[in-house]
Amino acid sequence: MADAGPRETLEGNVMRSRSGAGVQRDGAETTARHGVGTAPDGGGPVLDGRWLMRGPEGLLSAYARTPGGLLRWAETEPGGPRWRGPDFFAAPDVTSLSVAQGPNGFVHFVGRRTVRGKAGASVDVAHAIQYQTGRPLGEWKSLGNPHRDSARGVYVGNPVVSVAANGAAYVFLANASGDLAVCRESAAGKWLPWQGVKCRGVRSDMAPVPLASGLMEALVPTEAGAMRCCQPEPDAALARTPDLPLVPAEQSVVGIETAPGRATYYWTDPETTGLQAYREGGWVIPLGGSAAEGRVSALRTMIDGYDCTILAYRGLDGHVVLGAFGTGNEGAGVWWEPTGEWCAAPPALALDHFGRVVVAFLDADGGLRIARQGTGRSFVMDRSVQV
């Protein structure tokens, strides 16, 4: 297939099952003690964001929400197959968790924290950093609240974190008025005051995209549709652009950079459950498929010398579904393949130390399962193994 194009390379070769290598199972006591389950805010067991990621040492880590904190699994050697964990990290009073990794490998966590006292409840945004794969999280620190009045502050939404190419973290939040609030680090690493972006009816499922140029942009779903915010220049405040003619399903939209300075967004259509795509200057592109609730996962990689995009979602029957297509060429068709493997929440995608596509998902018992791209040509996935 040396002369095959993306269509011939990908069609019919998505997630064909083969028996996988064994994985060392650790952390049974931790799993039994803490478990993986619904968080206090009613959210699912996975963190919002790219909860499967590779550190600068080449080691993959996976994270899951659990009451009172989070769990982490980590590879013990680059490329696997052995893992350790899950390790438990407390996040007192934090009822939502979003995660993102910067280019330096630091992993940022933010959450909506509610503290109840004699004077009533107060809400702030808590932030913690993991500086090295497999190491403990740093101290949870407060980023405050866009409202000084604590009575109004309790009505803010769940924060979403992203990290720019220069390592600066950005936090996106729906404030009590339904407008967008953004808190970001300066080029010097200092947290700046909360910035407001007028747009009523903002939802708590923003999709930020850090561009290779150092700029940050985000698609922000609203009650009526969606808007897009962009930085006009490095270290500048985000500015609102014209509203977009699309309405993503709750918590489904994700974005990745598919060309220099150009992001493409993928989401689930709430009426048809099919997937759709959009990038500035174009139109909404139907992709097919049929997804259940939760974020779509997207990854860009090379397959047989071709620049390709991989999508993953949880199907209506609970099974992991993968799709592949030439990057920026969604209109030519996406080849979807159900994997036959059931997941408790939407799956995650990452590349391992050897550049292989890795799919992670949680099974019915809250255990982590990992499937890797096979060593042959084309996009063929091995059967998953339990960590």
Image: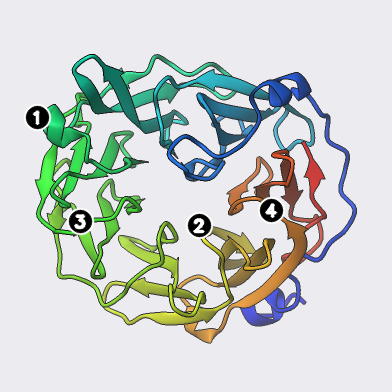
Q: What's the amino acid at mark 4?
A: Cys
Q: Secondary structure at mark 1?
A: loop
Q: Report the disc number at residue 294.
A: 2
- In the rendered image, the vertical position of residue 129 relative to residue 265, given as above or below: above
* Quadrant of the frame with the C terminus: top right
Classify 10 Å Cα crowding around label 4: few (below 14), some (14-19), many (20 and above).
Answer: many
User: How far apart are the alpha carbons under marks 1 and 3?
Assistant: 29 Å
Q: What's the amino acid at mark 2?
A: Gly
User: How far apart are the alpha carbons under marks 1 and 2?
Assistant: 33 Å
Q: What's the amino acid at mark 1?
A: Asp
User: How far apart are the alpha carbons under marks 2 and 3?
Assistant: 25 Å
- Quick check: 256 left or right of 226? right
x, y percentage for residue 41? 43, 39
User: How far apart are the alpha carbons under marks 4 and 3?
Assistant: 35 Å
* Residue at the disc numbered 1: 149
Give the foreground label among 1 and 2. 1
- How many numbered tags mark residues here? 4
x, y percentage for residue 235? 16, 40
Q: Report the disc number at residue 231.
A: none
The reply to whether callout 1 and callout 2 are in contact (CB within 8 Å) is no
x, y percentage for residue 21? 88, 43
Q: Report the disc number at residue 230.
A: 3
Along the line of sight, which residue is nearer the eye, 285 or 309? 285
The earlier-in-sequence mark between 2 and 3 is 3
The earlier-in-sequence mark between 2 and 4 is 2
Q: What's the amino acid at mark 3?
A: Cys
The earlier-in-sequence mark between 1 and 2 is 1
